[in-house]
Image: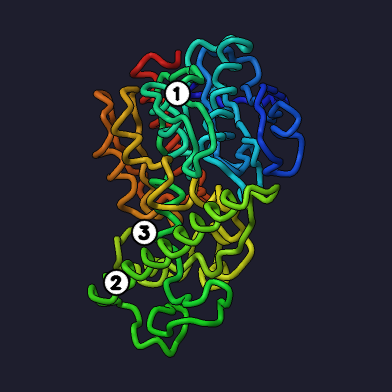
Amino acid sequence: MSADRTFEIDTQWLHIQYRDTSTFTETYGFSGNQGAVNLEGILMRPKGEASKTLLIYMHPTSTLQLLPVPRAAVQRGAHVLCAASRYVKNDAALIMEKVVLDLGAYVRHAKEVLGYEKIVLAGWSGGGSLALFYQAEAEDPSVTQTPAGDPVDLKNANLLPADAVIFQAAHISRAQLLLDMLDPSVEDETNPDSRDINFDIYDPRNPNQPRYSPDFISAYRNAQLRRMHRITSRVKDTLQELKRRNTGEIERGFVVHRTLADPRFLDPTLDPNDRKPRWCYLGNPETVNTGPVGLARFCTLRSWLSQWSIEDSRADGVSCAARISAPLLVIENTADDAVPKPHTQMVFNAAASPDKTMRVVEGATHYYAGQPELLSQANQLIRNWLAERHLIE
């Protein structure tokens, strides 16, 4: 990884297959139902620059090879693998424990087939809590089933621990992010037009308007938690009923309406940073609140428990950080319009790593869009941190 050169990027499509049998087809495609999981990744290397260290970027449901963060790392000399899970671009049925197995397959392939000696989990955005979940299970394995009770043996999966973890512009967990954004005005899960106007922050008739009072925020957060618990209770009851029937019907899909209503998007005095008011990483929050790309919009029962339920999901960055010992770098972007400001500090404070570092990139947004100098700054601090630990030349 070079401090003073810019490299062309050489890309290579990577296919990994490993044995895995699902009891039913949970996601479309050749993934588990034929006795194997097939994964696709993009290995990106700087032309002419060798390295014994590989940075693995993985998001539970997205692909990252076209985003500026991993590409900038390669242009400065890093070897990078952008790894896609079996649930790529479709998280409706996503099981976080199975994503950990997918990441484990990439780590093992990188060491045993590609020949890399050092692995760094670069957890950007939704990949941050995944990286911590993986590392916690690799160092201190404990999980043998999903929150729905289906077998998934991480304890005996022989996951290879990474040599370091980066938590960059990342949130605590998908469950916490959803809880922060879940619209508590919804009174009937089957009818999104049935709403409590006092909790609908996008309704101009709501008597509560920014700047929000502490009492309103407290009531709002409690109402969000009650709604999440209602959904979780219904999910568990439905799973129990399907098991009781003992038929071929074992899973269901459902819609969660209005899932992007964090009052922080409308009131910049809440957990203040440099973010743009009335905006978020997906655009206008009022539009996204009801649009198809909203968090958890389409779910299965099992997926809700594994990735979205605050009381059931194990992919919690705070608790997982408390179980790791690998060196940890935590990076906060002060204009992040996706990750709530407290999340980064909470992970850093909880981390058990004897070697942990927190850095702040002033003015950086979530994607560093139109901010090449800030992207370069973030990349340089990562490079310096890795070099200090002899993880790069």
Q: Position of residue 228 (x, y in %)?
A: 43, 62
| Nearer the camera: disc 2 or disc 1 | 1
In 3D space, how far apart are the residues under numbered discs 3 and 2 (Cα atoms)?
21 Å
Q: Which residue is mark 3?
A: 274
Q: CA distance from mark 2 to mark 1?
A: 40 Å
Q: Are the two marked residues, 3 and 2, in contact with CB atoms closer than 8 angstroms?
A: no
Q: Secondary structure at mark 2?
A: helix
Q: Which residue is mark 1?
A: 155
| Viewer-closest of 11 and 87 | 87
Residue at 43% from the left image edge and 82% from the top image edge? 196
Amino acid type, mark 2: Ile
Does residue 284 show up?
no
Can residue 291 be seen in the rendering of this structure?
yes
Residue designated by label 2: 217
In the image, residue 80 lies at what x, y percent? 57, 26
Q: Of discs 3 and 2, which sits in the foreground? A: 2
Residue depicted at x 50% and y 16%: 53
